[in-house]
Amino acid sequence: MDIRKFYIKTEPIELYKILKIDNQVQSGGEAKFVISEGLVMVNNEVETRKAKKIYSGDIIEFEGDIIQIVLEKK
């Protein structure tokens, strides 16, 4: 499994925003739906909190795609 890096400018960032910004879903509403349905994992655990705070180093899995959150260096 390949882990792709996803760079953020500030932390924390809400989980649903990452799915939307990364084009994993079409809208924020869809992001919130897939999270609430238990289809998203954070750090190898199912996450159902839409506004879960995500920090650099966290690993998000959705539909076979794995991304690692990385804080951009200034």
Image (cartoon, rainbow, N blue to C red):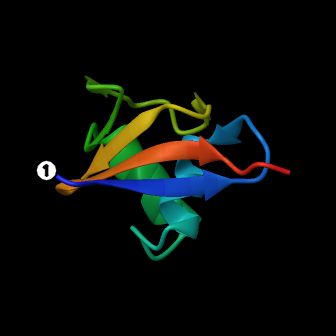
Dot 1 falls on a residue whose secondary structure is: loop
User: How busy is the neighbourhood of tag 1: few (under 14 within 10 Å), some, or many (20 plus)?
Assistant: few
Q: 37 or 42, which lies in front?
A: 42
At x 61% / y 36%, what residue is drawn? Answer: 51
Quarter location, residue 54 = top right
Position of 1 compared to 3: left or right?
Answer: left
Position of 53 compared to 65: left or right?
Answer: right
Q: 28 or 72, which lies in front?
A: 72
At x 57% / y 63%, what residue is drawn? Answer: 28
* Image: 43 above or below 38: above
- Circle count: 1
* Image: 52 above or below 6: above
* Amino acid type, label 1: Met
At x 29% / y 45%, what residue is drawn? Answer: 61
| Coordinates of residue 46 in the picture (x, y in percent) | 28, 28
| Coordinates of residue 58 in the picture (x, y in percent) | 48, 32
Quarter location, residue 18 = bottom right
At x 38% / y 42%, what residue is drawn? Answer: 60
Return the residue at label 1.
1
Position of 73 compared to 15: left or right?
Answer: right
| Coordinates of residue 5 in the picture (x, y in percent) | 45, 54
Position of 20 compared to 62: left or right?
Answer: right
* Image: 65 above or below 59: below
Query: For the view shown, which residue lies furthest in the right direction?
Result: 74
Q: 36 or 42, which lies in front?
A: 42
